[in-house]
Image (cartoon, helix red, strand yellow):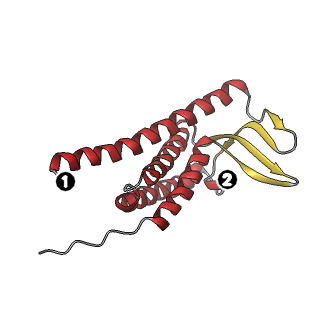
Amino acid sequence: MTAAAGTRAALARHAAVAGTAAVVLAVDVASKRWIEAAYGLGEGVWLVEGVFKIVHVRNPGVAFGMFGTLAWRYRVPFFLLTLAAAAWLLAHLWGQASRTLAGRLALGMIAGGAVGNLVDRFRYGEVVDFLDVWIGRFHWPTFNAADSAICVGTGLLMLVLWRVPEEAPSTPS
């Protein structure tokens, strides 16, 4: 492979991740703006009675609302540490995951979802959530499009990493 072809291939891999992240971010931001315009805080509507509800809530915590009752000054270090760990992990997995289209889509979904929730954290100090699922008396924590993309992307990334063999380290001649 020539240097130019290698550069084009690398750009294509980056473009697939960036494009996927941009689509996820756009869907997340648009859906959150819609919920904020359509419903007041705490308001919503059942789409499937007793099972699925659209409701405007805010999540000051992290995943599933953990640490939500702590003051913002105590949550900030946790958010920064989580952001740094996620960036390191994605950078560490880039080489192996980006070799397949599914891996690039997974990385883009995770990155786009993370940025979508980060936008809310900077705007409000909390995340706008609106998808509410119930199964009988069991209530799943309310979530949003970014959370969905992160979860689907993580599942897809796990499948990719399980299926794609690691490259053997090159040895000097």
For the C terminus, the quadrant is: bottom left
Amino acid type of the residue that numbered disc 2 sits on in the rendered structure = Gly
**42 on left or right of 17:** right
Distance (Cα) linking label 1 and label 2: 49 Å
Residue drawn at x 47%, y 65% as measured from the top left: 163
**Rendering coords of residue 34 (x, y %):** 65, 27
**Rendering coords of residue 102 (x, y %):** 47, 52
Q: Is 66 situated above or below 13?
A: below
Q: Quadrant of residue 155?
A: bottom right
Q: Which of these two is toward me, 75 or 166?
A: 166
Which structural element holds mark 1? loop
Amino acid type of the residue that numbered disc 1 sits on in the rendered structure = Met
**Rendering coords of residue 153 (x, y %):** 53, 52
* Pointer 1 local density, CA inside 10 Å: few below 14, some 14–19, many at least 20: few
Residue drawn at x 87%, y 44% as measured from the top left: 50
**48 on left or right of 168:** right
Which structural element holds mark 2? helix
Task: Give residue 47's mark.
Answer: none
Q: Quadrant of residue 168?
A: bottom left
Sequence order check: which comes first, mark 1 or mark 2?
1
Task: Give residue 65's mark.
Answer: 2
Q: Is 121 situated above or below 31?
A: below
Residue drawn at x 49%, y 51% as measured from the top left: 106
Task: Give residue 1's mark.
Answer: 1
* Pointer 2 local density, CA inside 10 Å: few below 14, some 14–19, many at least 20: some
Image marks 1 and 2: residues in contact by CB distance under 8 Å:
no
> Which residue is the extreme one toward the top?
37
Q: Which of these two is toward me, 93 or 99?
A: 99
Q: Which of these two is toward me, 12 or 50?
A: 12
**138 on left or right of 32:** right
